[in-house]
Amino acid sequence: LSGLSFAAPLVPVVSNLTGALADAGELRTPDYWVRHVREAVRFADGVTALRAAGVDTFVEVGPQSVLTAMADEVLPGDGDILAVAAQRRDRSEVSGLLAALGQLHVNGVAVTWPQWFTGVGARRVDLPTYAFQHQRYWPTTGRPRAGNVSGAGLGDAEHPLLGAAVDLAGDDEVVLTGRLSLTTHPWLADHAVAGVTLVPGTALVELAVRAGDEVGLSRLRELTVATPLTVPQMGGVRIQVRVDGAAGSSQRAVTIYSRQDDDTEAGWTRHADGVLEPVSVDEPVVGAWPPAGASEVDVAGWYEALAGHGLVYGPVFQGLRRLWTGDGTVYAEVALPEDAAGEAGRFGVHPALLDAALHPTGLLLAGEEPSGPQVPFAFEGVQVHASGAGVLRVRLSRSGSGVRLVACDEAGAPVVSVDS
C-alpha cells in the first residue's frame, strides 16, 4: 500500500472503520487501509451517523440486498427512510436496477432517465389529462418469466410451458413442473371448445415430447388424453409431467397431471398417459410444393364455420393459409402470426401451429357426422425432427380411423410427423 498514491475523495465518505465521517487526509494514508482490512466493520455506527447527518435515502450498490436489510434493522421504525438495493438475488440485473431506479424516482429522488434510454429511440410524450377517455396510453406488461430455479435445487426445463425439471433421488423417475395461466400464456385463450378455454392436445404432446428429451426418448409412441385440461379465466393451474420406468429402458411411461392454483387441498388430476421410445431414423417427406394434381380449396370463412360447431379459434390458432385436396390426401400450408412466430424457437413445435395443421382433418372424414365439437385426443408415433418452424407444409392422409400427418418447413426439411 505504501507504494500507491491516494487522492482525496470527491464525495463525503462515512468510514466503516470509525463509523463516522472520514477525514480526507486520513483516507490518504496506507495505515488507514491496513486497519480497514484488519479491524471490525462498524456498519451500524456508519448508518446511524448518516441518519444523524440528515440522510434519509440509502442505496446499496452490490450483488444482492443484504446491506439494505441490515440498514432497516439498524434504524427500526424510522418511517422517513428509504433503503433501496440496486440488485436482488431473485431478479435479473437489468430488471433489478430498473426497479431500484423506479423506486427512487417515485420517492422524489432525481433520476437522469435520458441516460437510461440512450440509443433506444425513446421520446417524451404528453400524458392524457381527460380522466374518462377510453384509450389506453400505458404499455401492456410483458409475459412474466420464471426466475432461476437452481437455488431451489431444481434444473431449468428451458421450455415455455415448463419451469423446472428434477430427477428424483433413489429413483429413476423424472418430473417436470410448470404453471399455466392466461396471464403468462395469453395465446391459450385463443383455443376455446364449447365456451371453455382448453389446453389443446398438441400442447400435451409438446409436454410429453419435452419430457422424452429429458430422458433421451424423444419419440412419443402413444399419448391418450383422458381428461381435458382447462385454464381458468383468473388464476392458473400447476402441471406436472412424470416419466416412470428404469433409466436406460427402451420404453418409459409418461403421465401429465394438473392441479388448480387456488385449491392446494385438492388432489392432482390425471390428464394424459403415454409411452416414450427412441427416435426413428426415418425422415418422412411431404413432396413437391405446391402439390401437383391437387385442387385448391377456398379457405375464406373456414374459422367462422368451425365456430358454428363450437370450435372457437383466436388469431394465434387461425393458422390455415392455403389448402388442397386430391386422391384422398389433404395438403395445407399453416403459419403462426408474426407476434407468435418469435417464440416458435422455444418449442419443439408450437402447439398452435401443430393444432392448425390438424384443422383440415374434417375433409378426410367427410360423411362421418360428429355428435359435437371434435378435437384430437389420441396420438401415435409423434416425432419432432426439427424445432423452431413458424410455417409448415402439411400432408394429411387417412390411417384407419385416424389421420396421418407429415409436415416440413418451407425448405422441405421434415419438422414433425404423426403416425395417427
Image: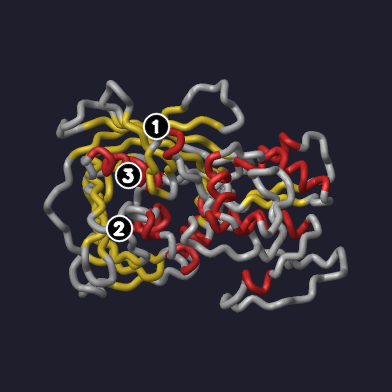
Q: Secondary structure at mark 1?
A: loop
Q: Can residue 194 be seen in this snapshot?
A: no
* Residue beneath disc 1: 226
Viewer-proximal residue, 412 or 115?
115
Label 1 environment density (alpha carbons within 10 Å; few <14, some 14–19, many ≥20): few
User: Which numbered dot is residue 290?
Assistant: none
Residue shown at 84%/51% (left/top)? 54
Return the x and y of residue 237 as percentages of the image width and height: 53, 36
Q: Secondary structure at mark 3?
A: helix
**Mark positioned earlier in the residue sequence (2 or 1):** 1
**Mark positioned earlier in the residue sequence (3 or 1):** 3
* Residue beneath disc 2: 387
Residue shown at 80%/46% (left/top)? 51
Return the x and y of residue 407 as percentages of the image width and height: 26, 60
The amino acid beneath tag 3 is Arg
Question: Which one is closest to the eye, mark 2 or mark 1?
Answer: 2
Q: Are marks 2 and 1 in contact (CB under 8 Å)?
A: no
* Residue beneath disc 3: 210
Return the x and y of residue 84 as percentages of the image width and height: 69, 49
Residue 323 appears in which quarter of the rendering? bottom left
The amino acid beneath tag 2 is Ser
The relative height of residue 49 versus residue 324 in the rendered view (above or below) is above
On the rendered structure, is 399 left or right of 242?
A: left
Q: Secondary structure at mark 2?
A: loop
On the rendered structure, is 408 left or right of 204?
A: left
Return the x and y of residue 198 as percentages of the image width and height: 50, 44
Q: Are marks 3 and 2 in contact (CB under 8 Å)?
A: no
